[in-house]
Image (cartoon, rainbow, N blue to C red):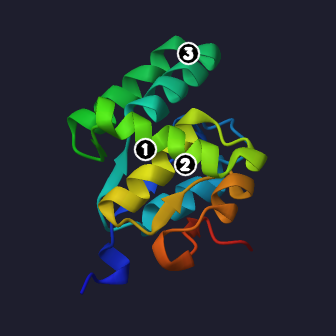
Amino acid sequence: MVNPSTAPILIDTGPMVALIDGNDQHHQVCDAVAQEITGAIFTCLPVVTEAVYMVNRVEPNLAKQIRHAFATGIYQLLPLTELDIDHVFCLMDKYNDQQFDFTDACLMYLAQREGIEKVFTIDRKDFSVFRLQAGKPLTLLPKPG
């Protein structure tokens, strides 16, 4: 059984950006959550793409911190293949009324595929609706306060 304190976590774009940009409105709460994480932190290329785009709009040199986080093993990249993309679009179809964006749907699919139940996200709207197999909701960090 996985120890809950060391369970793997998926990180979404919002916290990735907030952790780098000290002026981001979510910086302090995301930093506090990050200090408590002891398990592996995974993400996917669509999240990285969004995060690099967003931090480059603030300060181009901030993107180097994302690169450093991968180089030092803080974040780990989960691959998505062409076979996975069909599953992602199926999730988007299933939750069509919610209008999940592609990046969020990728993370939701990876949560299912990898058995990861925790997501570090600021986007509570989409991720709180999504259900894993057997109807189990994701655990969202930061916890509502």
Q: Is residue 32 above or below residue 28?
A: below
Quarter of the figure that contains the C terminus: bottom right
Q: Is residue 51 left or right of residue 43?
A: right
- Tell me how far mark 3 sits from mark 2, CA to CA: 30 Å
> Which quadrant of the rendered structure holds the N terminus?
bottom left
The answer to whether residue 3 is above or below residue 68 is below
Q: Residue at x 71, y 45 (%)?
A: 96
Marking on residue 39: none
Of 52 and 31, nearer the camera is 52
Residue at (47% x, 41% y) in the render: 88
The three-letter amino acid code for the residue at tag 2 is Leu
Separation of residues labelled 2 and 1 (CA atoms): 6 Å
Q: At label 1, which amino acid type do we have?
A: His
Residue 66 on image: x %, y %: 39, 30
Q: Which residue is mark 1?
A: 87
Q: Which amino acid, by three-letter code, is at mark 3?
A: Asn
- Label 2 secondary element: helix
Q: Is residue 67 left or right of residue 87?
A: left
* Residue designated by label 2: 91
Asked if residue 135 can be seen in this view, the reply is yes
Q: Do the CB atoms of the residues marked 2 and 1 lie less than 8 Å apart? A: yes
Q: Position of residue 37 (x, y in %)?
A: 40, 66
Q: Residue at x 56, y 76 (%)?
A: 135
| In-image side of 112 versus 23 (left or right) | left
Q: Earlier in the sequence, mark 1 or mark 3?
A: 3
Q: Nearer the viewer, mark 3 or mark 2?
A: 2
Residue denoted by label 3: 56
- Residue at 63% across / 15% down in the picture? 57
